Image: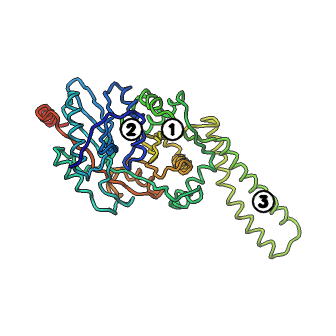
Amino acid sequence: MRMFTLVTLSDNEFVEFSARHPQGNFQQTASMARMRRSEGKTVELLGVKEQGELKAAALLQILHTSGSSFALVHDGPLCDYDDFELLSFFVKELKSHAKAHGAAQLDITPEQVYRLHTQEGEPTTPADDAMIKNLKTLGFEHMGFTIGYPAVPRWRWVKNLEGIQDEQSLLASYAKYRRRNVRIARESGVHTRRLGRDELHIFHELCEISCKKQGFPNRPLSFFEAMYDAYGDDIEYRLSEIHFDEYLATWQDKLDKLEATTANITKELAGKCSEKRAKQLNVQLEKASQDIAPVQRRVADAKALIERYGKVKPVEAAMFLYHPREVVCTTSGADGDFERFYAPALMHHEVMLTCIQRGIHRFNLYGVSGRFSKDDNPDYGVLEFKQRFNGFVEEMPGEFILPVKPLVYALKKFAHKLLKR
């Protein structure tokens, strides 16, 4: 018979376990524990040892509301859900701790993958139904195989960076369209940089633009400041800016060269040249003349943008969370008026370069809806943007709820049904 022991973990013990566990993620870290405590939640770092070896761990948080209390484990527990004995022991202890804190229910969202898919939605592995069965056997209610964008995404787009050593091989792994986007962004004066804490209002303002467009509420600036404080070096708020003076200089240089070419051809035609050479020059002149008009429009556009916005304009920002197993982008915002500069493409490309430099093999662009067809799919643009980096999709098992106080939980469900929530 296997012998398990429940232990309370120090921050360092929890960090080390999360770093090496195949399900380790930003939600299950000491940094998130600090964040949740700053929000007034009760947090415990619990682990299970077998013969002295740490086998499972969880950041258990208790949320107290006016009506009741909830016990939560986001993206966890970090545990082998197919090992029923281990899982059974840990669930029993988590339920006991939840009950001791007055929680009516224990909510978990396991980080063990249910099924892998291509980024077009085709399954590539069998479904892990044993995990679902084990959790149901232990009394959990499965909230279903949902689609859409819940608080903890069930469908996630991931880029595997293993084996990619440099920028050239990274670019080669993208779709042709995405390689072109990165090049255009750089040629258009787009630069990315890390924001300091005192600049987070820029990030928040760009998120506000996107939230209004999509009909979602934006988190308060104080939330992002608290995340910055809790995660330290493991969080990055990155900003994309367009340097319109560079954009102007690029197109002005092209215009100057075209005008110089036109002048040289015209001068040569005015002199003595053979009929054959004259035909060649006239073809070159016609092409150069055709090329000048669009370049002139770019120059005029750049000047107008400088006149309106100044030399530098923030256009896109995103929050990246670093974990030894992966980097996750959970939140972003952009000014849609500047889509033609492809700032988001360059930003994610440069963060992936950082992953490669740090030896991190997963770049997680987080939620997709689980809908993969263009037909009647308002979310298809989000998926398509991610697909052009060439990755795969992880389908997670979703949310599970274990009643801790069955009567209270039943009354709560009845009230929600009555209120149609």
The reply to whether callout 2 and callout 1 are in contact (CB within 8 Å) is no
> Which image quarter is the C terminus in?
top left
Instruction: Indicate left or right for 104 with 38 as reference.
Output: left
Report the amino acid beneath label 1: Glu
Q: Is mark 2 on a helix, strand or loop?
A: helix
Residue appearing at x 69%, y 56% in the figure: 292
Q: Determine the CA span between mark 3 and mark 1.
A: 46 Å
Mark 2, residue position: 14
x and y percentages locating residue 225 in the rendered image: 46, 28
Q: Residue at x 28, y 62 (%)?
A: 126
> Residue at 57% across / 60% down in the picture?
169
Residue beneath label 1, please? 236
Instruction: Please report the residue visible at 65 percent of the width from the left and 45 percent of the height from the top.
Output: 247
Q: As rendered, which of 26 and 255 lies closer to the eye?
A: 26
Q: Dot 3: what SS? A: helix
Q: Residues within 10 Å of mark 2 (few under 14, many from 20)?
A: many
Tell me which label, 2 or 1, sits earlier in the chain. Answer: 2
On screen, residue 321 above or below 146:
above
Residue 21, given in percent of the width and then of the height, sits at 38, 47
Amino acid at dot 3: Thr
Q: Report how far apart the C-alphas of labels 2 and 1 lie in the structure.
A: 22 Å
Q: Measured from the top left, where is residue 96 in percent x and y?
A: 20, 34
Q: Quadrant of residue 268?
A: bottom right
In the depicted structure, whether residue 239 falls above or below residue 220: below
Name the residue that disc number 3 marks. 261
Q: What kind of element bears circle 1? A: strand
Vertical order, 170 against 93 (above or below):
below
The nearer-to-camera label among 2 and 1 is 2
**Comparing labels 3 and 1, the label whose residue is closer to the camera:** 1
Image position, residue 350 (x, y; %): 56, 48
